[in-house]
Amino acid sequence: MAMPSAKWSHFGTSIFSVMTMAARRNGAINLAQGFPNFDGPEEIKEAAIAAIRGDFNQYAHSHGIPKLRELLASRMKKVSNLSYDSENEVTVFSGATEALFCVFQAFLNQGDEVLTFAPFFDCYPAGAFSVGAKLVEVPLRSPDWTFTAEDLETRWTTSTKAILVNTPHNPTGRVFSRLEMEMIASFAKKHDLLVITDEVYEELVYDHKPFTRMATIPGMRQRTVVISSTAKTFSLTGWKIGYIFAPPELTKELRAVHQFTVFCAATPLQAGICAALELGDEYYEKLRKDYQVRRDFLCEGLQKLGFKFHKPEGTYFVVADYSHISIRPDTEFTLQLVETKKVALIPTSVFYTDPTSTAQRQHYVRFAFCKDIETLKAGLDHLA
């Protein structure tokens, strides 16, 4: 009998699955995995249901249904003044995770290095590993989660081919300033790097803070691959409709990979997202307002409990220092919490390539506030 390959075994089970299963097993409140405990607008679901009942159930065009690509390009033009050709510069994927995987496959080779800011979303190392590339961390300095130009330069080598920038940033909630984005842009141009931006939380920016897109910085559109998703914007994380904006020559390479992974995203769900993108501005305004209320509620509660944190400027996460409570390592601490306090959180050490290094052994956990107020209150009560 042939033995299975073990080359992926070191990744194990995702921490999100581990903590969600632990929450179910212990009857705990799940403030770990970043999915809302509520759905998006009914009209979006009804549009998908109508598509299923109609004749919209076969393969879509691999690039995405034309109407959806047109609506995505229109939304991007409206919010950033960036013009993308829906036919040659916009591609729909089965979620941002598949989109990122296709980016790694299309543009990186064995031995290449890609810089990214740590802590980072846990699928980044897997994407790099899939092509034999190396993910190189640029640590964000706590408690404000900042970096310097020197942090970038000291990690550049002749093998560096790209930099992956996630803003609004998961897990810290930072929204990088224009000065920071210009710093990254200058670094990328100096070393002729591809810039990959993960903007899946683009609509979740609070307190009227400006959100700077890398592609809007002069000279950057042609070297930037913009990844985003509809999951967080429309509270439909299970639909997995992601997309990429990129210049034609880069889009061509991405589509070559995409057609041999999932070929196309789910056809009726693409139809549903068309209805989502036809919602008015009031939808996005209410979305931000509602999440800001949840953020402030959770932050106020955590502050009363003695947690220390940088108030998130975007996303729906808070990373908090628990050193006043325990000296246990974060993974051990979160497993203890889910059993004794019935609250599930994410240990942040999993968002580094080496979770045991000295700089990363700080005591931080990630809270998700994409829950209704009643759930957030119950979680805070349990912790208290």
Image (cartoon, rainbow, N blue to C red):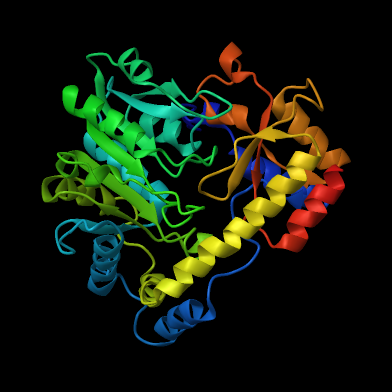
Residue 272: give x, y in percent of width and height.
41, 75
Q: Is residue 34 above or below residue 186?
A: below
Would you say residue 357 is visible in this rendering? no
Please say if 203 is above or below 43.
above
Residue 21 placement (x, y as % from top left): 71, 47
Q: Residue furthest left?
A: 249
Report whether 382 appears left or right of 367. Answer: right
* Residue at figure coordinates x 46%, y 54% from the top left: 208
- Mark yes or no: residue 205 visible: yes
Determine whether, in the image, residue 78 is placed left or right of residue 247.
right
Looking at the image, residue 96 sits to the left or right of residue 113; the answer is right
Q: Which one is in front, 152 or 156?
A: 152
Q: Where residue 323 sits in the image (x, y, percent)?
A: 75, 24
- Above or below, 38 against 109 in this view is below
Q: Which residue is drawn at 70% across and 50% down?
A: 298
Could you tell whether 66 is left or right of 21 in the image?
left
Q: Using the image, determine if residue 358 lies above or below residue 240.
A: above
Nearer to the camera, 162 or 143: 143
